[in-house]
Amino acid sequence: MGRIVPPAAMPRALCLLHANCQGEALRPLLEATPAFARHFRVLHVLNYTRAALPEDLLDSCALYLHQELGAKWGELSSDEVRRRLPPSCRTLRLPNLFFQGYWPTWTRLPGVDFADTLLEGLLRRGLSPLEASLVYERSRPSFFGDPASIAEASLRREEEKEQDAPIRCAPLLRELWRTEQLFITVNHPARRLVLHVADNVLRLLGLGGLPDSVARAYAHPQEDFWLPLPPALGLPESDGGLALPFAGRQRRYRIFARQMTAAGYARCYLSCRAAGEGNLLTFLAHLEPEA
């Protein structure tokens, strides 16, 4: 007679988590949920690095959690990966969340972390980091374009992305974004949204949702860097602001080993850029801790 293997010793199936940095925030919630951890071990492969997914890895995959990648990704496109998975593998599409409403002057600038069009413009005008940071801190909302319209456009993009999605975050974002900060940076959702995604994943897998104890114990791995909001967004809507209760001159944000106001962050950003550095996060991470 063959040896009976107790349930605790049964090998766990592979869950391939193919996602960007948002997978880093989701993974600990899944692994801390007993109903999930009993069945699966998680391998997180960052999708944006374009790391290959070997055939033997896909052959052993029992659960494929992924952010959708289009045809331009070639063999890493979601359609192609799903084609290569075994028929028994379950697949579930994850959100790929982004919100610009808290940072209306954020822009994609090659080689620069969290580039800001207003700060870059002040730098080009020859202002010192101190002068430019004071302008940034005291600027009226109109200096940041039309913050309300920028936020609305970003919300609509999220809603459009989720029209056929199994997990929807846009309704929660639209309901709460003005009263609770729901993003840490433009592409790092904060605690409430990550918990929402994890709960939906577990329910869709038939595992009963996210336990309250796991949610309470959760330590978000990306809360060591909060991208400061322009203080002008805290001004009343009658003044062109967004009346955000968590934006203002006095708020101090966690920036690695320091706590900084938006103006202090702007000075660091401008000092880094004036020195010809592009890697702002490395620059900030190496600042001496506050006494």
Image: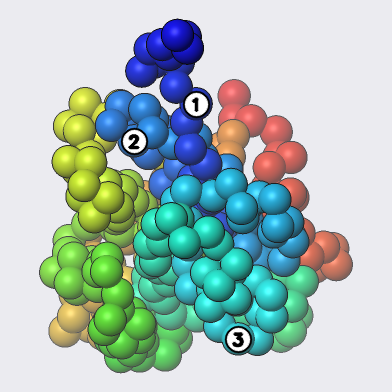
Q: Which of the pair 109/41 is nearer the observer?
A: 41
Residue of label 1: 11
- The x and y percentages for residue 33 are 31, 31
For the residue carrying disc 2, how many other residues have a C-alpha within 10 Å: few (<14), some (14-19), or many (20+)?
many
At label 3, the amino acid type is: Ala
Residue 43 in view, yes or no: yes
Q: Nearer the viewer, residue 247 or 9?
A: 9
Q: Earlier in the sequence, mark 2 or mark 3?
A: 2
Q: Amino acid at mark 1?
A: Pro
Residue reaching furthest to the front: 1
x 54%, y 49%: residue: 61
Evaluate if marks 3 and 1 touch, with contact meaning CB atoms under 8 Å apart. no
| Disc 2 element | helix
Front: mark 1 or 2: 1
First in sequence: mark 3 vs mark 1: 1
Numbered circle sitting on residue 36: 2
Front-lying residue, 65 or 23: 65
Q: Mark 2 to mark 3: distance in Å?
A: 31 Å
x, y percent for residue 41: 50, 35
